[in-house]
Amino acid sequence: MATGPGTLALAFAPVHKRALGVAVGSVAGLFIFAVTVFHVVLRPAGALDIALLGEYFFGYTVSWQGAFVGLFWGFVSGFVMGWFIAFVRNFVIAVRVFTLRAKGELARTTDFLDHI
């Protein structure tokens, strides 16, 4: 495995917020849709009460219509979570790289304090 400055730069590259939001939103929406369809078609005995999702997602019920409402709200909430995770990750990496560069610049200049 090749390592070098290019590989290290890719490790600290910013994550695209909208892309991560769409990815997480799609997975979350499809998951809620699939679980709802599973409950509508098979009606499993002793399963968790997924109707409680209606407390969080306006208009959600355990029905075919509710599956599509859950798909929508799952996408929206997943998008917000994915976007926020990418934002926080990018911010933390940027602050960390900035502080490391500042410390490196201070360490390189041996007479920095003499000029103050």
Image (cartoon, rainbow, N blue to C red):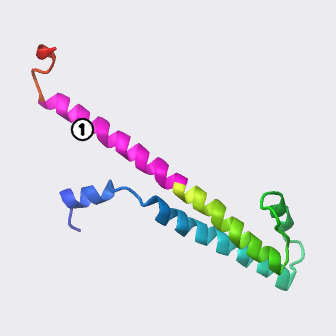
Question: Given the current orientation, which residue lies at the most extreme right position?
Answer: 45
x and y, in percent, of residue 75 in the image: 64, 67
Q: Secondary structure at mark 1?
A: helix
Q: Is residue 60 above or below residue 102?
A: below
Question: Looking at this rendering, what residue extends furthest in the bottom direction?
Answer: 41
Name the image quarter holding residue 13.
bottom left
Q: Place residue 59 in its image quadrant.
A: bottom right
Amino acid on which the number 1 mark rests in the picture: Arg
Residue at (87%, 80%) from the top-left corner?
Answer: 43
Q: Position of residue 94 (x, y in %)?
A: 36, 44
- Quarter holding the C terminus is top left
- Residue sitting at 66 percent across and 71 percent down? 29
Q: Name the residue: 76% across, 71% down.
A: 69
Residue 107 located within the stretch drawn in magenta: yes
Residue designated by label 1:
101
User: In the rendered image of this protein, does residue 77 appear above or below residue 97?
Assistant: below
Instruction: Locate residue 76, reporting x and y percent.
Output: 64, 63
Residue shown at 42% from the left, 61% from the top = 16
Q: Main secondary structure of the magenta part?
A: helix
In the image, the segment drawn in magenta is 84-108
Left or right relative to 69: residue 110: left
